[in-house]
Image (tube, helix red, strand yellow):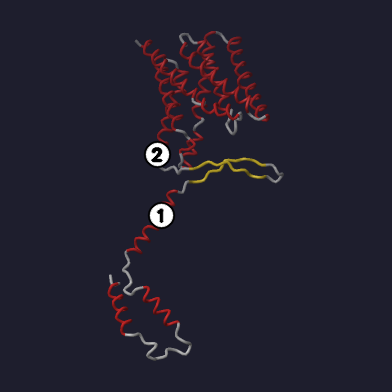
Amino acid sequence: MDSSLSFIIGIIGNVVSILVFASPVTTFWKVVKKKSTENYKVVPYITTLLCTSLWTFYGLLKPGGLLILTVNGAGAIFQFIYVTLFLLYSPQDKKVKTAKLVAILDIGFLGSVIAVTLLLLDTKLQLIFTGIICAVLTIAMYASPLAAMRTVIKTKNVEYMPFLVSFFLFINAGVWSVYSLLEDDFFIGVPNAIGFVLGSAQLILYTIYKNKSKLKVQKQVKISKADGSIIEVSAYEEDDRDHHEEEKRLKDRKLNKNRSLPRPAVNRLYSSNKLMRTLSWGPYGVQYSSSNLPQEDDVEIENEEIIHDLP
């Protein structure tokens, strides 16, 4: 019963892990289309290639380690393709750095571990030695999002910690933790239990800060250096829609206030005419003559306008 259940859990773990390994496919499709790696970092893929390769070797050494072998073999193939695309489409200086890292970690270190395990250790110690190295590397990989978690707490912005990545890592660690309990495998259990705890913490942070995050827009800004060269950097500007909405509300409130004011009792045309008539008087003051005084018909008309304009 336990063996069949652990096999089912292992199959589920294979599916989830392969989905995690395949998640950067869209990113590298863009790299191929643009024929440029832009600002993407290659180090995570190089270290994941090393980790999955060592776990593949562990699956070969472990009796009944078929599911460990298949999932990590598939992961190693994915990472190898990603690193190869980096070598093809990155600038020349990055190609050299990438090639050095691959030579040191994925060839030199991996080859040394395999050589020491097979040539210097007996059968009992081979699995323990390889398992310890795999567990340490997996813990380091699961702990790598700690920097992103600190950034989220500091900035109160979940932009630097994508939800889907955190969610799938949480599920992946949980499934393999259950598998390790059923298989009684300490080397698989410890790093995945730590990953499960860290994944839970990431999801909790996301829940806390997702509504507090301010929408930001990334823009590429070109800056001229003193030597005449131009560099391109990423700049972020906060979305100030809330600020605009607040200004709109204040403006509407002022307009409504102006509309609620009582209408003037005197007709504006009458006031303007009276003002112009006053200004047309000569510099020597008002001449009290019959020509300057309003006639009776004018007074009646003006009085009617005043009455009609009352609110």
Name the foreground residue: 145 vs 255.
255
Q: Residues within 10 Å of mark 2 (few under 14, many from 20)?
A: some
Judge from the rendering whether residue 215 lies leftward or rightward of residue 121; answer left or right: left
Q: Which residue is mark 2?
A: 208
Where residue 185 sits, quadrant-wise, is top left
Amino acid residing under circle 2: Ile
Name the foreground residue: 28 vs 10.
28
Judge from the rendering whether residue 8 lies leftward or rightward of residue 50; answer left or right: left
- Give the Cα distance between marks 1 and 2: 30 Å
Q: Secondary structure at mark 1?
A: helix
Residue 1 vertical placement versus 277 (above, below): above
The quadrant of the rendering that contains the C terminus is bottom left
Mark number, residue 248: 1
Residue at horizontal 41 percent and vertical 21 percent from the top: 175
Estimate the x, y position of residue 265 in percent, counting from the top left.
Answer: 31, 73
Residue 41 vertical placement versus 80 (above, below): below
- Is the C-beta separation of discs 1 and 2 under 8 Å? no
Name the foreground residue: 65 vs 27.
27
Estimate the x, y position of residue 284 in percent, counting from the top left.
Answer: 47, 90
Residue at horizontal 41 percent and vertical 79 percent from the top: 275
Q: Secondary structure at mark 2?
A: helix
Amino acid residing under circle 1: Lys
